[in-house]
Image: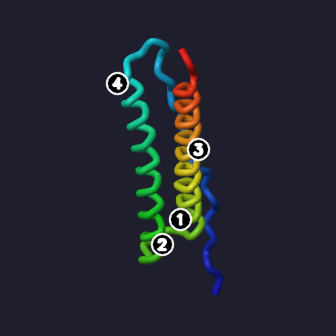
C-alpha cells in the first residue's frame, strides 16, 4: 500500500526588524524589544501547536512540525545571543570613566 507523499513547502521569508531612528525615544526601543520578544514567543507557540497537531493525528506532517520546532529554536538562540551582546555592550559602557 503506497502512502501519498506531499511536497515540502518552503518556509515564509523572515521579516526584517527595523532599528529605531537615531535620537529616538526609549519608548521606541522598548516597543521594538517587546515586538521582538513577542515574535519569538509566537514562533514557540506555533511550534508547540505543530507538534501537538502531529501527535494528535490532525493531518500535520512530520517535516512541518520539525521545521516549526527548528524555526522556534533558531529564533530563541538569536534572541539569546542578541541579549548577550547588549549586556556585554552595557557592561563596557559602565566601565568607561568620564
Q: CB under 8 Å between callouts 2 and 1?
A: yes
Query: Sequence order check: which comes first, mark 3 or mark 2?
Result: 2
Compared with residue 53, is residue 83 higher up or lower down, i.e. above or below? above
Residue at the disc numbered 3: 81
Mark 1: few/some/many CA within 10 Å (<14, 14-19, 20+): many
- Tell me where residue 81 sits by quadrant: top right
Residue neighbourhood size for the residue with mark 3, other residues' Cα within 10 Å, grouped as few (<14), some (14–19), many (≥20): few
Q: Residue 29: which disc? A: none
Q: Position of residue 10 (x, y in %)?
A: 62, 51
The coloring applied to the image is rainbow
Q: Nearer the viewer, mark 3 or mark 1?
A: 3
Left or right: 43 in relation to 64: left
Q: Nearer the viewer, mark 3 or mark 2?
A: 3
Classify mark 1: helix, strand or loop: helix
Report, in whole angstroms, how far the alpha carbon at label 3 lies from the one at label 2: 30 Å
Q: Position of residue 74 (x, y in %)?
A: 59, 51
Residue named by callout 1 = 65
First reached walking from the N terminus: tag 4 or tag 1: 4
Name the quadrant containing residue 2: bottom right
Looking at the rendered structure, the secondary structure element under dot 3 is helix
Q: CA distance from mark 3 to mark 1?
A: 24 Å
On screen, residue 66 versus residue 42, left or right, reads: right
- Between discs 4 and 2, the one toward the N terminus: 4
Distance CA(mark 4)–CA(mark 2): 40 Å
Q: Which residue is mark 4?
A: 27
Q: Percent position (x, y) of residue 63?
A: 60, 66
Q: Which label's residue is closer to the chain start, 3 or 1? A: 1
CA gap, disc 4 to disc 1?
A: 36 Å
At mark 4, the secondary structure is: helix
Amino acid at each position: 500500500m503506497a502512502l501519498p507523499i506531499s511536497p515540502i513547502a518552503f518556509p515564509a521569508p523572515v521579516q526584517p526588524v527595523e532599528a529605531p531612528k537615531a535620537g529616538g525615544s526609549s519608548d521606541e526601543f522598548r516597543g521594538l524589544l517587546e515586538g521582538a520578544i513577542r515574535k519569538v514567543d509566537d514562533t514557540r507557540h506555533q511550534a508547540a501547536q505543530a507538534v501537538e497537531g502531529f501527535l494528535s493525528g490532525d493531518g500535520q506532517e512530520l517535516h512541518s512540525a520539525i521545521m516549526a520546532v527548528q524555526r522556534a529554536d533558531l529564533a530563541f538562540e538569536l534572541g539569546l545571543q542578541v541579549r548577550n551582546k547588549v549586556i556585554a555592550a552595557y557592561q563596557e559602557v559602565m566601565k568607561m570613566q568620564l
